[in-house]
Amino acid sequence: MGDVGIKVALNPVPRAGGDGRGGVETRDVGSTARTDAGGGQTFRPEAGGVELAFIVENGDEQAIDVVLRPKQWEDYIGQEQVKKNLRVIIDAAKMRGEAVDHLLLYGQAGLGKTTLARLIAKELGGTIKTTSGPAIEKVGDLAAILSNLEEGEILFIDEAHRLNKMIEEVLYPAMESRKLHIVIGKGTGARTISLDLPPFTLLAATTRVNLLSAPLRSRFGATFKLEYYSEENIKEIIERSAKILGMDVTEEGARILAKASRYTPRVANRILRRARDYMEVHEEKKIDETVAKEVLDFLDIDSLGLESHDRNLLRAMVEKFGGGPVGIKTLAAVLNEDGPTLEEVYEPYLMKLGFIKRTPTGRVIGESARKHLGLPPDKLV
């Protein structure tokens, strides 16, 4: 059995990088170091002074994104109920000296699932190994990851809804009884061996929780939905990020950017980085009300955060279909998009605003959308 264990351990694990194969990134969240998944440059996002200034001034987008992420539990703004419940789970596990139960985080993209996973690992004082559903292509990939886990480690799988069913079936016993079942050989000579796994925590994140199989969902000890942030929370995030980047932003400037950030931290930080570019090119000293509006005009983002593709979708519904109802496939064909993109990228925010409503017969446009676009009620463009 020892030889078999070696074969499993040496099974190559794809690594994230330029080859596009995806893979596993290991991070000791107790330290300040971060090594990129390709094995190259090391960033120290918690460091200050010259090191932080170098990252910001050189404009490395990936590095800046890391710098802006909260590094301490108390720095994570928003999602208060989720944090409160997680705090109890984490503290109870630490008091018992046990691994935290497996956890599932779901919600729209950009709401902080990955950041929260890293903070959970840091609170537990352990190492987090990060991979994604698309990166685990074969059972052997997952076996290699699981067999190399150490006691107390956290395995974070992003985009968990993209795990195939064979991978899920390997996860079931690993999550439930800490067993890794491996099939050796083929045909009539095939046999199954079981390897014991150390206590570990699986943290999974997804934007499509409905696509996870019921057996997989049932094996998580707790499931948390991350909601859209309040406008006030987004404003706080913008002010925090601006301070880190050495930008001067007034309260009204921050509020205008927050209102256009789709209640999403990732969008807020993206807009702020582009505002930083605008300020440098136009030699602006601070983001006040005027500059904030100029930045949004420059980015072709309106006051509610709608971009050109959002407006095109809404106008198509009015111009082509009289406001609906219209099926998602028909709408996707008119916009030259695929259905999943409309459902996952465009619709959630538009539905939150009440600009689109789903009905049994298709999508219909809300009167508030007509008003926002400057269209009279029940009148085509």
Image (cartoon, rainbow, N blue to C red):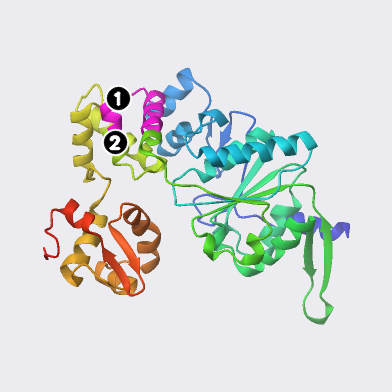
Q: Is residue 139 left or right of residue 381?
A: right
Find residue 250 and report its image quarter: top left
Badge 1 element: loop
The alpha-carbon separation of the residues under discs 1 and 2 comes to: 10 Å
The answer to whether any part of residue 271 appears in the image is yes
Read off the residue under disc 2.
Answer: 257
Residue 239 in the magenta stretch? The answer is: yes
Q: Are marks 1 and 2 in contact (CB under 8 Å)?
A: yes
Find residue 9 and report its image quarter: bottom right
Quadrant of the drawing holding the C terminus: bottom left
Q: Earlier in the sequence, mark 1 or mark 2?
A: 1
Q: Amino acid at mark 1?
A: Val
| Residue drawn at the location 75% of the way across and 43% of the way down | 99
Find residue 3 and report its image quarter: bottom right
Counting from the top left corner in percent of width and height, residue 369 is at 22, 56
Task: Please name whichever residue, 21 or 195, is drawn nearer the observer in this view of the structure.
Answer: 195
- Magenta residues: mostly which secondary structure? helix
| Residue drawn at the location 64% of the way across and 38% of the way down | 121
Counting from the top left corner in percent of width and height, residue 337 is at 31, 66
Q: Amino acid at mark 2?
A: Leu
Magenta extent: 235-255
Counting from the top left corner in percent of width and height, residue 278 is at 24, 33
Read off the residue under disc 1.
Answer: 249
Query: Is residue 26 placed above or below 346 in the rendered structure?
Result: above
Badge 2 element: helix
Q: Is residue 261 left or right of residue 371?
A: right
The outermost residue toward the top is 49
Count of residue discs: 2
Task: Please name whichever residue, 27 or 219, is drawn nearer the observer in this view of the structure.
Answer: 219
The answer to whether any part of residue 126 appears in the image is no
